[in-house]
Amino acid sequence: VYDACVAPALLPNVIRGCNATVLAYGQTGSGKTHAMGSGAQASRVPGLIQMTVAQLFRQLPEGATARACFVQIYEDSVHDLLAPPLVDGELSRLSLKRDSGGWSLPAAR
C-alpha cells in the first residue's frame, strides 16, 4: 500500500499543501492496526504511519509546517488518538461539524 499509493501519489500532494487521508477499513482482526503501525515497536517492520511521517520530514522544505490528526472511527464515535486519555481511561471523542466547505473535525489535535 505504501509503495503503490502513499509514496507516489499521496506524499507529493501533501508536500504541495493538499490534505490527505489514509483509511484502514475492515473487520476485527484483519490487520488494520498492524498495517497502519499503531502500537509499533522498534524491532518490527514500520507501519504506514511511520513510513509516511519519516518520508514527509525528509521531503519537507526547511521551515515548513506540518499538521496531522490521528483518529479512530469506532461504531458511531470518532476518537482523537493524539489526545491524552480521559481520567477514566476513555478516548477523547470528537464532534463532526458540517459547513459550506464540507465535514471537519475542528477539535482534532
Image: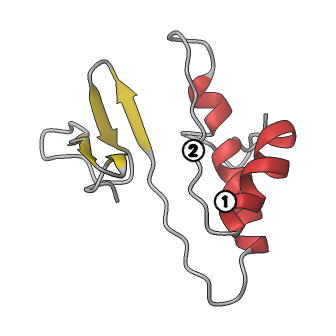
Residue type beneath disc 1 = Val
| Left or right: 80 in relation to 69 | left
88 to the left or right of 92: left
Helix, strand or loop status at disc 2: loop
Report x, y in % for residue 92.
23, 44
Residue 51, image x, y percentages: 74, 52
- Name the residue at 78% across, 72% down: 59
Given the current orientation, which residue lies at the most extreme bottom position?
63
User: In the rendered view of the protein, which quadrant contains the N terminus?
Assistant: top right
Mark seen at residue 101: none
50 on left or right of 101: right
Q: Secondary structure at mark 1?
A: helix
Outermost residue toward the left? 87
Q: What residue do we see at 17% from left, 46% from top?
A: 86
Which quadrant is the C terminus positioned in? bottom left
Tell me if 85 is positioned left or right of 15 in this view.
left
Neighbours of disc 2 within 10 Å: few (<14), some (14-19), many (20+): few
Closer to the camera, 77 or 98?
Answer: 98
Up/down of 75 relative to 92, above or below: above
Q: How many marks?
A: 2
- Counting from the top left corner in percent of width and height, residue 108 is at 32, 54
The 10 Å Cα crowd at callout 1, few under 14, some 14 to 19, many 20 or more, is few
Which numbered disc, 1 or 2, marks the residue that appears first in the sequence? 2
From the top left corner, tell me how far across and down residue 57 is, in percent: 70, 71
Q: Amino acid at mark 2?
A: Thr
Q: Which residue is mark 1?
A: 53
Residue 21: mark in rendering: 2
Query: Residue at 86% across / 37% down in the picture?
Result: 4
